[in-house]
């Protein structure tokens, strides 16, 4: 179960996969172009990297990703503690 502000690991991994697939689709999809339609993007770019059916990809694209997963965590690593 989800509590306010936290995402359990199973849901978090699913949402990360949704984000990765959505990023690929966003990068290659062009509305109105048959050569870069959702089906062609799925077949050429998504399926070889993430084997899933076409309908699953469409579900991933329509799934909203929470803000906390959209932005990478910016953490400054330090070599020595001050």
Image: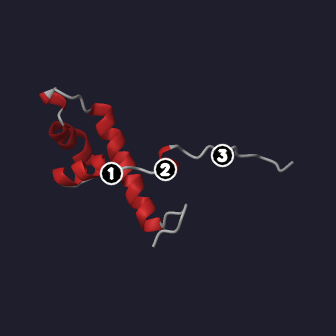
The mark that comes first in sequence, 1 or 3, is: 1
The residue lying at 17 percent from left, 34 percent from top is 37
Secondary element at image label 3: loop
For this orientation, the residue located farthest to the left is: 34
- Count the numbered circles shown: 3
**Residue 28, how many percent across, how many down?**
28, 32
The residue lying at 35 percent from left, 51 percent from top is 18
The residue lying at 58 percent from left, 47 percent from top is 73
For this orientation, the residue located farthest to the front is: 4
Eye-nearest disc, 1 or 2:
1
Name the residue nearer the viewer: 54 or 48. Answer: 54
Q: Which residue is mark 1?
A: 63
- Mark 1 crowdedness (10 Å alpha carbons): few <14, some 14-19, many ≥20: few
The mark that comes first in sequence, 1 or 2, is: 1
Name the residue nearer the viewer: 25 or 4. Answer: 4
Secondary element at image label 1: loop
Secondary element at image label 2: helix
Q: Which residue is mark 2?
A: 69
Q: CA distance from mark 3 to mark 2?
A: 14 Å
Eye-nearest disc, 3 or 2:
2
**Residue 70, how many percent across, how many down?**
47, 45
Eye-nearest disc, 1 or 3:
1
Name the residue nearer the viewer: 3 or 13. Answer: 3
**In the picture shown, does residue 26 fall above or below 12?**
above
- Mark 3 crowdedness (10 Å alpha carbons): few <14, some 14-19, many ≥20: few
The mark that comes first in sequence, 3 or 2, is: 2
Residue 75 badge: 3
């Amino acid at each position: 179960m989800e509590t306010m502000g936290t995402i359990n690991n199973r849901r978090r991994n699913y949402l990360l996969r949704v984000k990765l697939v959505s990023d690929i689709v966003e990068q290659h999809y062009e509305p109105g172009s048959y050569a870069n339609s959702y089906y062609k993007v799925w077949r050429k770019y998504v399926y070889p990297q993430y084997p899933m059916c076409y309908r699953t990809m469409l579900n991933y694209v329509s799934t909203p990703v929470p803000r906390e997963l959209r932005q990478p965590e910016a953490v400054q690593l330090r070599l020595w503690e001050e």
